[in-house]
Image: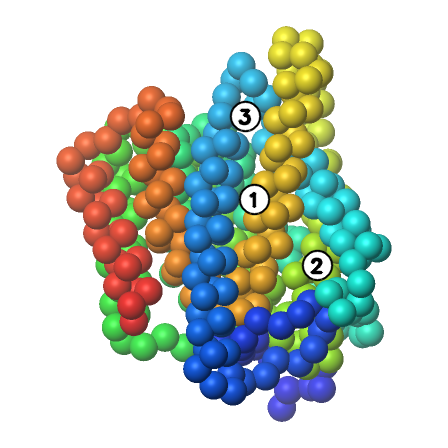
Amino acid sequence: RRSEDHCTPAPRHAPPHAMNGAPPKQADGPSEGFWYTTGVIALLLVVCAESVAFSNYNKYVFLPENLPAPVLYTATCQTLSFCGAVLIWLLAPEWIYKRAPLNSTASFLKVMLIPVGFVMNYGMNNLSLKYTTVTLNQLIRSFSPVVVATTSYLIEGKTQSWPILITLCLLVVGVIMGVGTSPDFEVLGTMICSGSLIGNAISIVMTAFVMGDAKVKLQPIDVMLYTTIPSVIILLPWSLTLGEIETLRRSLEENGSFWTMAWILIGGFLACTYTFIYVLLIKMTSSVYFSVSGGFRTIAAITVSFFIFKQQVSVKSLIGMGIAMSAFIANSYF
């Protein structure tokens, strides 16, 4: 039997509400359904645009001549996200946002799983960009629905239909083929990026899980307030062991304080807005839906990256990408 404190999954189709912790309600008619659908589509478009910009921007920042300190960069982005969340908490009226307190140890521990997932997800993902191309990074990350669906089943008890399971198997085949036959294949970057998928699954599924808690009812800003600083506490020692403070000092000397700080501040803005929007999207839909919608973000990020960075591709790799992306779209349909 589940304890009273056990979290329940967030509803898959709950209409958007003010961020004051009001309980979700069912759509009363066509008008509410229209605005809910419009809101989800708008959020998907914004998430897609920010995801494409963020991936390619991070790769640019981590070039050897710029600021190749991905873990320290991720920590500063999280710090700036926390500052943004605090400003909203202090300045927004209660009808827009009211902080939800964590009233039990069990709820606190569940929320603390999110920063662990975040560090594994974005910390390792950003670190992999230092060694591999945006295309391979995104293609490996497109394996996420398989990991998220598995984790969602283990944590939330969600099961998938046979058509979805078939598309997930095709996704596995496409990703392995696309990555393994790429001329840009690099073992270290591939291993680091693959490891980030576990963190991605924990982060997405636990965000959906705790935001549906019957006791807590966390909102997007709550997640940012409670999880960003623990993430920084984990990231900073990791950054120190990698010698990234020296990398930062070298960047300040060679590129100047203006450009170094500009790269960090722009990254922080993208991180803050992207985190808020993707958490809100998970709340309005589901963890699996968000992950599967990443197929469109992946296609866009890979396409844009070829116009910005020098990358190679083989015929077999292209076929693998085609299978993987087709599986994404089919998975979204089912």
The N terminus - image quarter: bottom right
Residue 154 is situated, as x and y percent measured from the top left of the image, at 50, 72
Q: Amino acid at mark 3?
A: Val
Q: Which residue is mark 2?
A: 221
Relative image position of residue 78 (x, y in whole percent): 69, 43
Q: CA distance from mark 3 to mark 2?
A: 27 Å
Instruction: State the residue in front, 46 or 334.
Output: 46
Residue found 65% across the figure and 38% down from its top: 268
Q: Is residue 130 left or right of residue 113?
A: left
Considering only vertical position in the picture, is 21 above or below 224? below
Which tag, 1 or 3, sits closer to the chain's start? 3
Rendering coords of residue 209 (x, y %) = 60, 71
What's the mark number on residue 122? 1
**In the image: residue 68, left or right of residue 139:** right
Q: Is residue 23 visible?
A: yes
**Which image quadrant is residue 238 in?**
top right
Q: Residues within 10 Å of mark 3 (few under 14, many from 20)?
A: many
Q: How is the image coloured?
A: rainbow
Which residue does the numbered mark 3 point to in the structure image?
A: 61
Which residue occupies the foreground of this view, 105 or 204? Answer: 204
Taking the spot 35% from the left edge, 43% from the top edge, the residue there is 300
Q: Quadrant of the C terminus?
A: bottom left
